[in-house]
Image (cartoon, rainbow, N blue to C red):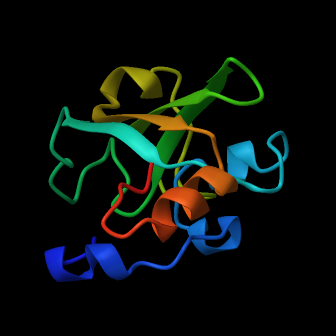
Amino acid sequence: MLRPEEEGNVPPCHPDDLKGDSIDSTHTSVTPKHSWAPTMVMTLEFKFPIPKQPSPDHSARTIAVFSSGRFINDPQGRHDTYVELWTAPSNISEGEVRPDWRESQRCLCVATQMALLVSMDVNIRKGNNAGGAKL
């Protein structure tokens, strides 16, 4: 995040600079090369605390991730991402599989993100205006 005094001095951004954006891996294969995906809305909802260890039903260092993403107005426009983090019954390649293992798992967190796919021309044009918004 930029400090207020740095906001007007930000050079235009290139898509290769956005590797930390959470949808980078899902949008690069279907969007034009000269676009970027600024996050407009992101929510994090913590559902359940990590179970205390040691626990016979939950791993101390492994979680399960469920993720889905979809484009609206494909290929340019809006991209929605939905992610759930769940406890796991054991560490990877360890433990025994019980028939009822799903019953004791807990949803730890739900996250959603809405991003816009924007042409780099928009970012460069707005970024060159002194004090102008980046979008």
Q: Nearer the viewer, residue 107 or 18?
A: 18
Vertical arrangement, residue 87 with respect to residue 72, above or below = below
- The picture quadrant where one finds residue 27 is top right
Check the picture and name the quadrant holding the N terminus: bottom left
Vertical arrangement, residue 128 with respect to residue 86, above or below = below
Q: Is residue 60 visible?
A: yes
Residue at 58% from the left image edge and 66% from the top image edge: 18
Q: Position of residue 106 (x, y in %)?
A: 29, 31
Residue at 34% from the left image edge and 36% from the top image edge: 41
Q: Position of residue 107 (x, y in %)?
A: 31, 31
Q: Nearer the viewer, residue 104 or 14?
A: 14
How many callouts does the rendering have?
0
Residue at 52% from the left image edge and 52% from the top image edge: 22
- The picture quadrant where one finds residue 125 is bottom right
Horizontal relation, residue 88 to residue 13: left or right: left
Horizontal relation, residue 117 to residue 65: left or right: right
Q: Is residue 88 visible?
A: no
Residue at 69% from the left image edge and 17% from the top image edge: 73
Q: Position of residue 29 (x, y in %)?
A: 84, 46
Vertical arrangement, residue 85 with respect to residue 91, above or below = above
Q: Position of residue 111 (x, y in %)?
A: 35, 36
Horizontal relation, residue 45 to residue 80: left or right: left
- The picture quadrant where one finds residue 16 is bottom right
Q: Nearer the viewer, residue 39 or 45?
A: 39
Q: Nearer the viewer, residue 91 or 63?
A: 63
